Image (cartoon, rainbow, N blue to C red):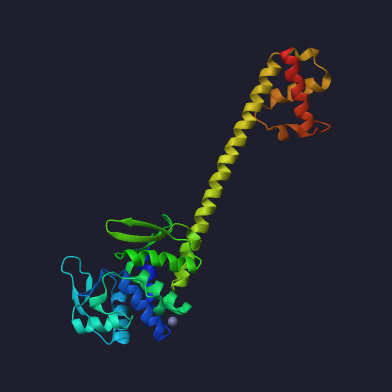
Amino acid sequence: MSFSRDVKNEICRAKPAKSCDALAECYGILLYCNTFSSSEARIITENEKLAERVTALFGECFGVEFDDTRLPESGKRSLIITDKRKLETVFGAFGLAPEDTVSHHINLGVLEEDCCRTAFLRGVFLAGGSVTDPVKSYHLELVTPHFNVWRETVTLLREMDFSPKQVSRGGNYIVYFKQSAAIEDFLTLVGASGCAMELMSAKIEKDMRNSVNRRVNCDTANVSKTVDAAAAHLDAIARLDMETLPEKLRETARLRLENPELSLTELAELFDPPVTKSGLNHRFRKLAELARD
Ligand SMILES: [Zn+2]
């Protein structure tokens, strides 16, 4: 089952609390569904729970029933209203008349309260939304065929502190989010807090894996630094006559020759009395200087 489907099923588990919200949700559904014109309203979905919800909401808000058919090839549900009087009722609920509506706008008069704006976005997501499985990537989009609705949705989301991106594709208009935090907030807002939590834990797991990888890369880098330093030390020592070296330097050269694999810190611990890492570093610089001369 897809993540989108999980989200929609979770949303469908709770009914709108108030009648203003039921109406606002229907509005979001209509503006983001397959067709909402003066001659037809058509909602096509493969999600049974969603079809049930939409049928119940439209009965409650407008007292209308859909012509409910199943598409033969895909088995999807097709919910259609073509009856003129039914369409007038639906349009009328949003202060519109079918014959006067050339292009749709979001009538903000219907969405004055915060609860109604939230419910509207829930309808928008149910009809025109999808979200990628967060294990793969972060992407949530809302697709409408209506240009003005697209732009006004962006404005509405900005007023609600979201920063959506927008793009048009093949005659459809898309609002989308790429940030996991924004997707999480959106899902929580529209009533899918369980799926938002799932997204959050997928992100934590991914971040943790990345930080482990970074750590491993970092360790590898340290190992190669150690190897390079030891190689330089051995190279210098090879060019020196051990017998002529002062005692401290001779001991340093000897311990290095015997322990070429150790880091400077580890090597410093072998001295008796012990030396510091920077003290040891100083001795190797001295050895390198002598080797150059
Ligand atoms: Zn409301």
Quarter where residue 13 is shown: bottom left
- Please, is residue 165 above or below residue 245 in the view? below
For the N terminus, the image quarter is: bottom left
The location of residue 186, given as percent across then percent down, is 46, 67
Front one among 215 and 96: 96
Residue 146 in view in this figure: yes
Front one among 232 and 97: 97
- Please, is residue 4 above or below residue 64 in the view? above
Residue drawn at the location 48% of the way across and 62% of the way down: 182
Residue 51 is left or right of residue 226, and the answer is left
The image quadrant in which ligand 1 is located: bottom left
Which residue is most to the left? 72
Quarter where residue 151 is shown: bottom left
Residue 196 in view in this figure: no
Residue drawn at the location 39% of the way across and 79% of the way down: 110
Front one among 211 and 86: 86
Residue 267 is left or right of residue 43, and the answer is right
The location of residue 106, given as percent across then percent down, is 37, 72
Residue drawn at the location 66% of the way across and 22% of the way down: 232
Q: How many marks?
A: 0
The location of residue 252, given as percent across then percent down, is 76, 24
Residue 220 is left or right of residue 128, and the answer is right
For the C terminus, the image quarter is: top right
Residue drawn at the location 40% of the way across and 79% of the way down: 109
The location of residue 157, given as percent across then percent down, is 45, 67
